[in-house]
Amino acid sequence: MRDRESTAQARTTDPPRERRRALFSGHHTHLWGFLLAGWLVSYADRTVTGPVVSWMIENKAGFIGDASNPATLGGLIGSMFFTGYMLTQYAGGRLGDRYGHREMLVVSLLWAGLLTLASGLTGGLIGFVVARVLTGLGEGVFYSNDRVLVIDHTPPARRTIGLGVVLSGLSIGLTVGIVATPHLIDLGGAWGLGDRAWSMPLYVFGVVSLLVAAATWRFFRARGDRPLRLGPPALRLIGYSVPAAAAIVALFVLADEFSWPEWLTAVGSGVLFLVMVTIVIRGIVRTGRSSRLLNRNVWLIYLSFIAVMWNLWFFSFWSVQIVAESAHSSLGAAALTAAFNAGAGIIGFPVGGWIADRRVRAGKGRKPLAVTCAAVHTVLAVAFGVSLLDGRPSLLLLGLILFCSGLFFNALQPIVHSLLGDLAADEDRGSLFGLFNLVAEIGAVASPVVSGVLRDATGSWAPGVFTAAGVMAVSVVLYAMVKERIPAVA
């Protein structure tokens, strides 16, 4: 009862939605820029884990270098991060609907910066996992609130390109995380950090995240008719995150203590996911919103986006290691080659949004674009897997395939986000995007560890690539079944 009264009070004190839209009138492109910067640092913070793990494996250093199955263990660490990231998706959207989406974005950026710094300060495997899990829990609230702000404050005729431009920060962050991390590790070695040279990129990215958080807070404060109150949503997020982190870390500690196989620990993450989804769905049904948040169309999009998160974090987490092993190249050369996939999003995200908006202005749907992009990425992913079967594929070939597949893969995402946003009422968008990414993140949780298990079991990365392509092929069918709603534009 108290939660309902507090929610009602928060809604009555918020300015009306049309008035809130006016806060960024004429400044929606400035809003895009700050949200792009948020995505950049957020993805650099999370991407750093993959190259750090690869460095430990290559140099037999840190808390992974001496493991019997280092690829599997490294993938499991990535899965633990995304288990945390997944569990705050819906909660983040609900907190944004209640306390304000601006507030939740600033809290998320501050949280991510502090916990990324803490990740570099840890001294062992368990401490690192705790810090990464907590980082994921804080970063998980960014997504649903960012999508709502773009949709609410961008003219409908430019909505999809706005979503795409902002998401290009994801690709920039991925590229920076992949390319800069080996050099920052070398810098750490030159500064005398020795076996702890891997912590240098975590220090650098953590500080940059805090600077972006401060700039974003200043921007929002200057364009609001009410002060940003970060304390209440931060406390609610802490209250939610502590038990979630305890459950995730307990799963990892038990697995380490009793020497469970890593795949069984990943199954435990899946159980946590199912419990969370069950709790969320029961809450939606009790509040009478199932027709808006659980209808056929949104479920098709929820499930189809699992493939996006699976492929995103298969290639983002393991692409450096895949290229280094397959082409027998150095870690630096592999990072530059793998960056072609992430860097393609700098073009793919805004171009996909631009093309989709042109179709909307012409009274046409965006679904055919989504189906086409998913299908082309599937074919190119298969081609990448086939190229790995060669004894020593060229870096040029691998980079070219990664770049071309990345164009279509990244163009797909703002198109799907815009499709989903038009299926929801204004007051439900935070919850809708939160539930959407909660379901989709099971792909990010499963992908790194499943791919690592396949690599250790077969001695090749090709099975993992073919698995990612197969998951995306299923999404092509699901997108084709969606009945979209085309918005009216002036």
Image (cartoon, rainbow, N blue to C red):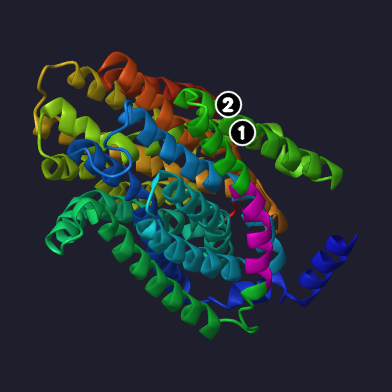
Q: Position of residue 133 (x, y in %)?
A: 50, 49
Q: Amino acid at mark 2?
A: Met
Check the image and report above or below for 226 versus 488.
Answer: below
Q: Quick check: can you spot residue 364?
A: no
Q: Amino acid at mark 1?
A: Lys
- For disc 1, the neighbor class at 10 Å (few under 14, some 14 to 19, many from 20) is some
Q: Quick check: can you spot residue 380?
A: yes
Q: Quadrant of residue 303?
A: top right
Residue drawn 13% across and 45% down? 332
Q: Secondary structure at mark 1?
A: loop
Q: Nearer the viewer, residue 100 or 147?
A: 100
Q: What residue did someone put label 1 on? A: 483
Read off the magenta span.
232-245
Q: Nearer the viewer, residue 359 or 124?
A: 124
* Residue 244 falls inside the magenta stretch: yes
- Count of numbered circles on the image: 2
* Residue 490 falls inside the magenta stretch: no
Q: Position of residue 214 (x, y in %)?
A: 44, 77
Residue drawn 25% across and 41% down? 56
In the displayed structure, does residue 417 sit left or right of residue 37?
A: right
Q: Secondary structure at mark 2?
A: loop
In the displayed structure, does residue 84 sit left or right of residue 33?
A: right
Q: What residue did someone put label 2 on? A: 481
User: Which quarter of the rendered picture does the C terminus lie within?
Assistant: bottom right
Q: Which mark is residue 276?
A: none
Residue drawn 39% across and 63% down? 117
Q: Alpha-carbon distance for marks 2 and 1?
A: 7 Å
- For disc 2, the neighbor class at 10 Å (few under 14, some 14 to 19, many from 20) is some
Q: Position of residue 136 (x, y in %)?
A: 50, 51
Residue drawn 51% across and 22% down? 477
